Image (tube, grey):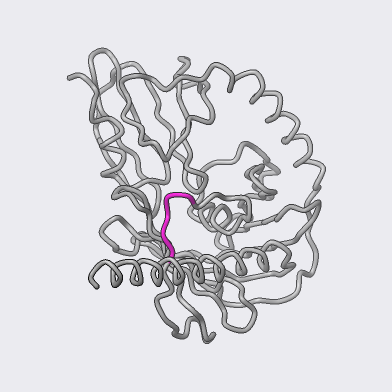
Amino acid sequence: MLLTFFYAANSFAQTEEAKCFSAFNELRTNYLKAEKQMTVSVSNSSGMTLHRLLHIYKDNKSISYWENLNGEIRGYALKGDVGFDFNQDKEYAGPLTWHQTLIWDRLFNSDTDLTGFSCVLTGRTRVAGQKVSLIRLAPKDSYRYGYLIAKDDVSAMPVELAVLSPNFGIITKITVNFVSPVDGLNLDLSVFDNLSEQNSVNNKEENSFLEIWPELNIPKEYKLVEEGEIEDNGSLVPYQLFSDGITTFRVYKNAKTSVVIPALTNGTISILRKSSGDYEYAVVGEIPILFAESVLSDLPR
């Protein structure tokens, strides 16, 4: 009898999780092909900022154009997993850097693999005046962010995304406050094609011989996707970039310096520095600070 109860409970849990993933995949499918203009607020411990998000669908890819509504006209554009930063006031376009909203783009990208996450339907409520269903994506490990998504009951589109720390506190909240039709996209889409070709060449040259630095403690959910060097005060600093498909982080290996501020966090972004021997390591990216500490936990003193 007890064994029968166990199998019945397990079967019910699997069915409920399948329903949850089905609801989430419906949301991603609808978002992929949506052509909308949205006013989006991003709030964390540093305060709240407003953004304009233009989303269109072209060449079977989701294209997002995020523009900060405070100060200079700046932001980033993303097509699939290829993107760049821009600043219209300074006529600048450059490599894509970290943004609090990139988790939104990657999570709602239909190509993102959610292996290693469980899915739970947690009820219904109202967010930004909309009736929504709540979907919680929880990592099966104890160190990555979790996600609580509010899905509009009528349009099946995302209304809000809360990024959760491993202890379930809210790190960052991204909320759609207003939606309207797209009234134009002042963006040269050929830029994405050039970037895609460049990335393809770089990946062919680099990915065939990438090896994780042996002194790092990298969990199995994260893969080494890139390595390179950046210039810092006239010196070249090597780095390795890791990703689980939703979040990314870099590890830099520099000459030893005097570390004034060893750790910082800003919303979903963490920075941790640690000296070891003649080197200083820095972990920078979209991971909790305790996770960053774990990455450098095996360094010799």
Q: Quadrant of the C terminus?
A: top left
Answer with the quarter of the image where residue 169 lies.
bottom left
Residue depicted at 31% across the width and 39% down the height = 292
Question: How many circles with numbers are drawn on the protein?
Answer: 0
Left/right placement of residue 237 relative to residue 33 reads: left
Residue depicted at 44% across the width and 85% down the height = 125
Left/right placement of residue 162 relative to residue 85 reads: left
Answer whether residue 73 is magenta in the image.
no
55 is higher (above) or lower (below) than 258: below
| In the foreground, 224 or 231 | 224
Residue range (magenta): 115-119
127 is higher (above) or lower (below) than 101: below
Answer with the quarter of the image where residue 183 lies.
bottom right
Provide the major secondary structure of the magenta segment. strand
Residue depicted at 67% across the width and 56% down the height = 64
Image coordinates of residue 53 in percent, x first then y, are 64, 63
Instruction: Kindly give the residue lying farthest to the left in the view shown.
Output: 301
| In the foreground, 123 or 206 | 123
Q: In which quarter of the image is the N terminus?
A: bottom left
Image coordinates of residue 233 in percent, x first then y, are 44, 19
Image coordinates of residue 132 in percent, x first then y, are 51, 81
| In the foreground, 248 or 86 | 248
Image coordinates of residue 50 in percent, x first then y, are 53, 66
130 is higher (above) or lower (below) than 283: below
Residue depicted at 23% across the width and 30% down the height = 297
| In the foreground, 57 or 27 | 27
